[in-house]
Amino acid sequence: MNIGEAGKKSGLSPDTIRFYEKRGLILSTKRDEKGHRYYAENDVGWLGLLACLRGTGMPLAETETFTHLVHEGEHTVPDRIDLLENHRKRLAQKRAELDAYETHLDEKIAYYNSVLEKQNKEAAQ
Amino acid sequence: MNIGEAGKKSGLSPDTIRFYEKRGLILSTKRDEKGHRYYAENDVGWLGLLACLRGTGMPLAETETFTHLVHEGEHTVPDRIDLLENHRKRLAQKRAELDAYETHLDEKIAYYNSVLEKQNKEAAQ
DNA sequence: ATAGGGGGTTGGAGCTGCTCTAGGTCAATA
DNA sequence: TATTGACCTAGAGCAGCTCCAACCCCCTAT
């Protein structure tokens, strides 16, 4: 499939895929006779993983490290697990922070609604 | 309190606070006789709200809009509610995406652990 | 009294990670 | 045939910080 479809399936924009390719984050980068990139289902899986890692806040440099590990072969599996588990821990922290922010936001909305109610009451008098 | 303490309490770095000030996002920007910024408890509350909005992904431009509404006075309360509720909806979407990514990540880790186990079994033979 | 450390100030450069633009090729469609 | 649309490239632009140099002021220790 072409880069547009691969983008839709994986959740990355074509621009982002090309950018990642330059940075060495793409495992397979084949071209057809027109020079256009094409991807197999498998490749889209990899793109989806990149989307997942980046979308959960893994820095690009670390995503690069992970890609290198994958390139190096099966003996790097323990290192990959390490890297992903560290990332998962960070993600848990980030989620806790997000929860706190969400509560804060809800409280603010509730507060503004109470202000609005008070304003309406006063206007009715 | 000074900018360092205000930063710690609100979750923003002093650099970020100064940057927001340039962008017009800070309600109160008083200085002491040395030219140093100082903040009251109230101001820190506002900084904390900024941290919350930005930390949940509200674009800076929209945060600016919100600040302008606050400056304009109490009659903008309905607009503020609108803005915050739209943001909350976006946040819910973002959270759903994050949940999906987290599942994806966990699956990947589980997969790598199964690979590792298989490798260990083969090595033991 | 002076040297060092720890806080603050400024303007501006640098960084990350996209995202968009200009200028081009090719294939199909009105 | 001309326009539409999807791809290509190199490189500029943008968001949102983050860091740096160069400076000021106050305090403590030598």
Image (spheres, coloured by chain):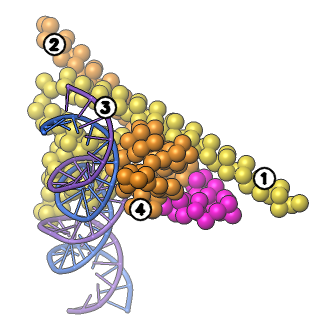
Chain colours: A orange, B yellow, C purple, D blue
Q: Label 4 vs label 1: CA separation?
A: 32 Å
Is the Cβ of the residue at disc 1 closer than 8 Å to that at disc 3? Answer: no
- Which chain's residue wears label 2? A
Kind of residue at disc 2: Glu
Mark 4 against mark 3, which lies toward the viewer?
4
Asked if residue B18 lies in the magenta stretch, the reply is no
Q: Mark 4 points at which residue?
A: A23
Does mark 2 fall on the same chain as mark 4? yes
* Front tag of 2 and 1: 1
Marks 4,1: beta carbons within 8 A: no
Callout in the foreground (1, 3):
1
Q: Does the magenta stretch include residue A63?
A: yes
- The mark that comes first in sequence, 1 or 3, is 3
Label 4 resides on the chain identified as: A
Q: Outermost residue toward the top? A: A125
Secondary structure at badge 3 equals: helix
Q: Is mark 1 on a helix, strand or loop?
A: helix
Looking at this view, is A31 or B66 the one in front?
A31
Q: Would you name the residue on which mark 1 appears? A: B118
Calculate the distance from the C-alpha at mark 1 to the C-alpha at mark 3. Answer: 46 Å
> Where residue B24 sits: x, y (%)?
15, 47
Q: Which stretch appears magenta?
A: A61-86
Q: In this view, does B114 lie above or below A113?
A: below
For label 1, the crowd category at 10 Å Cα-Cα, with few meaning under 14, some 14 to 19 and many 20 or more, is: few
